Image (cartoon, helix red, strand yellow):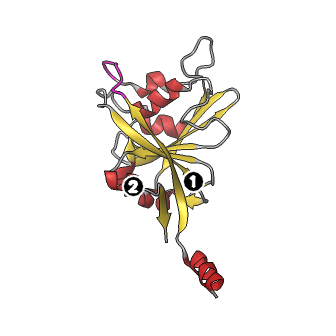
Amino acid sequence: MSTQATDSSLVNAPKATLLHIGTVDIPSLQMFRFQPRMLFCMNLREPVVVRIADVSSSFRQYFFSALASRVAPSSQLDFFNLMDRLPVGNIIEEVGGEGAAATTLQAIWYLLCQQGNGEFGRLLTNGMFNYFFVKDHRRKLRVVCLIYRGEGWHISAFNSTSTHEWYRGDRVFVPVKLKMLHSKPRIVTSF
């Protein structure tokens, strides 16, 4: 009988959706002005700091018309692997809403520089997607998507209101929240 109770409790248990993998420190970049249009551009020449194979028109539309921004202060990002297929809206809710989810293009650029040619690291380089939430020049939350394929990084962006579903194994990066989120277990659940 105790086996039956255990089985039924497993059926009713919340489903794990985000598995905390780690935290990364993002330093303040030593640039006078951060200009996305100068950095996030196709570049396959040798030597290259970040091998970019493609930048989508939507990414250019959302982020290239912005004026050069001041250098962002240092920060930390948590990164999670998706344990199930989920739409964007659910992921935003899981990490605490739009305000809590937003990071910067500077943080993304820092991570790209660490793995510019597809080296192993915090960004996935195995054909799975890396997702970030960033506010565009109109302060609308957008999803920035990075994927590494053999020739280099592919960078795109889309609306955070999209019904697009992310896949199991994709990675999500969000700013570090209150210490409460870092208590064990490091799994975010949905009911």
Please report the residue visible at 50 percent of the width from the left and 37 percent of the height from the top: 59
Image coords of residue 163 (percent x, y): 54, 60
Please report the residue visible at 69 percent of the width from the left and 26 percent of the height from the top: 151
Between 67 and 43, the one lying in front of the other is 43
Between 9 and 93, the one lying in front of the other is 9
Q: Is residue 77 left or right of residue 71?
A: right
User: Pointer 2: what residue?
Assistant: 183
Up-down: is 44 above or below 103? above
Q: Amino acid at mark 2?
A: Ser
Q: Is residue 132 left or right of residue 169?
A: left
Q: Secondary structure at mark 2?
A: loop
Up-down: is 95 above or below 52? below
Please report the residue visible at 45 percent of the width from the left and 21 percent of the height from the top: 38
Going by the picture, which residue comes out furthest to the top? Answer: 47
Going by the picture, which residue comes out furthest to the bottom? Answer: 1
Q: Is residue 150 left or right of residue 49?
A: right
User: Pointer 1: what residue?
Assistant: 82
Up-down: is 182 above or below 116? below
Residue 115 showing in the rendered view: yes
* Label number found at residue 8: none
Q: Is residue 33 left or right of residue 22?
A: left
Please report the residue visible at 63 percent of the width from the left and 79 percent of the height from the top: 7
Residue 99 showing in the rendered view: no
Q: In this picture, which residue range is highlighted in magenta?
A: 27-33
